[in-house]
Image: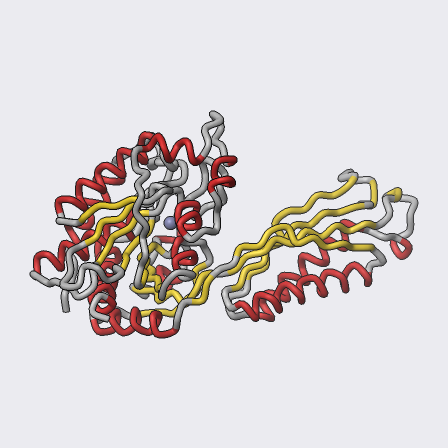
Amino acid sequence: MLRINRNRLWSDLEALGRIGAGARGRTRLAFSSEDLEARRLLVRWMEELGLEVHSDAHANLWGVRMATEPTLAPVVAGSHIDTVREAGMFDGTLGVLSGLAAVRAMNEAGIVTRRPVAVASFSDEEGGRFAAGGLAGSRAMAGLLTDGELGAKRDEAGISWLEAAAQSGFVGSDRLEPHAYLEYHIEQGPVLCDEGTPIGVVEGIVSLSWLRFTFRGQANHAGAFPMDRRHDAGLAAACASVALNRLALELGEGTVVTAGQLELKPNLANIVPGEAVLTVDVRQFRPELFEEALERAERTVRAEADRLGVEVTVERLSRAEGAVFLPEMTAMVERHARALGYRTRRMPSGAGHDAQILNRLCPTAMIFCPSAGGRSHCPEEFSSLDEVGAGADVLLNGLLELAER
Ligand SMILES: [Zn+2]
């Protein structure tokens, strides 16, 4: 089976990782001068590999390889090269540069596929600069974010997303219409690293919702008011947190429930809390289990509030739909990994990726490689040369199969 050139991929990662480098890690916020410098290097590499470079109205960038039937929709490998502040050198970049590594391997083997293979880099995946919520480039491409919304998203200097994109010089008039999409990414969690499993076969991306529970009891003197007659909103929030933790463990299947934010009123040591606001993050990647988790989280909290004689109201603050990838796409990734001799583990992604947007447009799959200690979004983010290379080999063989369909 064909494999990519690991050393070249590694040196590409290092070269791109030097752009925007500072005292800690590197910073390439969307459409910053560092992001644009990285884009220029990417375009140069695409052209050196013989790819035809395109971009769309939202500065999403892709290079298309020649094919025997060049008018067919391309099979796309993609991710992003923008970063958070003080980032590592793998998040996003790995998927894009592994796409180039796959093209290089095809070129060197003299392979011409039926469908074109393309390598894509989506704009503003991280969402830090304009608070556009992440995945902005791919969401705009899929029609999930309008230009009206992007025109209203501004950075600290008052520059809007659309203005920054227009000034970048990377806005074009093409449209990416993928036949299938593969995204290779670091896991960003500790599971593969702890197990020593080289390849994560991603079954889907979690859906996420934030629930805000407001408990209203009765503020009273901490000394004079008897324990058995209290309506302690703080106690209700604490018991709710414990019960939600138990619920997540009981639901299992990767359900995570985090009671991460709590405000007490009046928040004084000698007063029984009269009000408590608890904000809870619920994630699960199977849609039916996600709904069940949300419903049962609400019921669980109401039961705790009732038991303690406290009123509670619930608001659903935000909700982001994840993705469930087509089983045949997931199976294809698994098959290629095993044929290459790599052990695999099926898993959902707890983090958001462009793949969850692309999954609305075409059959999509994701490949994970281990992240040392589960660290990411920090300079300590690390995957070894062999770990990085293994996933890129899987990407290459997946692209080759899809490009013949
Ligand atoms: Zn990423």
Q: Number of numbered discs present? A: 0
Please say whether residue 379 is visible from this viewpoint: no
Residue 242 in picture, x, y percent from top left? 67, 59
Please say whether residue 220 is visible from this viewpoint: yes
Residue plotted at (21% across, 73% down):
339
Q: How is the image coloured?
A: secondary structure
Residue 11 in picture, x, y percent from top left? 18, 45
What is the quadrant of residue 221 in the picture? Answer: top right
The vertical placement of 367 against 377, above or below, is below
Residue 308 in picture, x, y percent from top left? 82, 59
Residue plotted at (34% across, 53% down):
372
Residue 405 in picture, x, y percent from top left? 24, 71
**Along the viewing direction, whichever of 163 and 97 lies nearer the viewer:** 163
Report whether 357 appears left or right of 289: left
Q: Residue furthest top?
A: 157
Report whether 273 appears left or right of 341: right
The vertical placement of 204 against 328, above or below, is above
What is the quadrant of residue 173 in the picture? Answer: top left
Q: Quadrant of the N terminus?
A: bottom left
The vertical placement of 293 against 319, above or below, is below
Residue plotted at (12% across, 62% down):
112
Report whether 68 appears left or right of 91: left
What is the quadrant of residue 272 in the picture? Answer: top right
**Along the viewing direction, whichever of 61 and 146 lies nearer the viewer:** 146
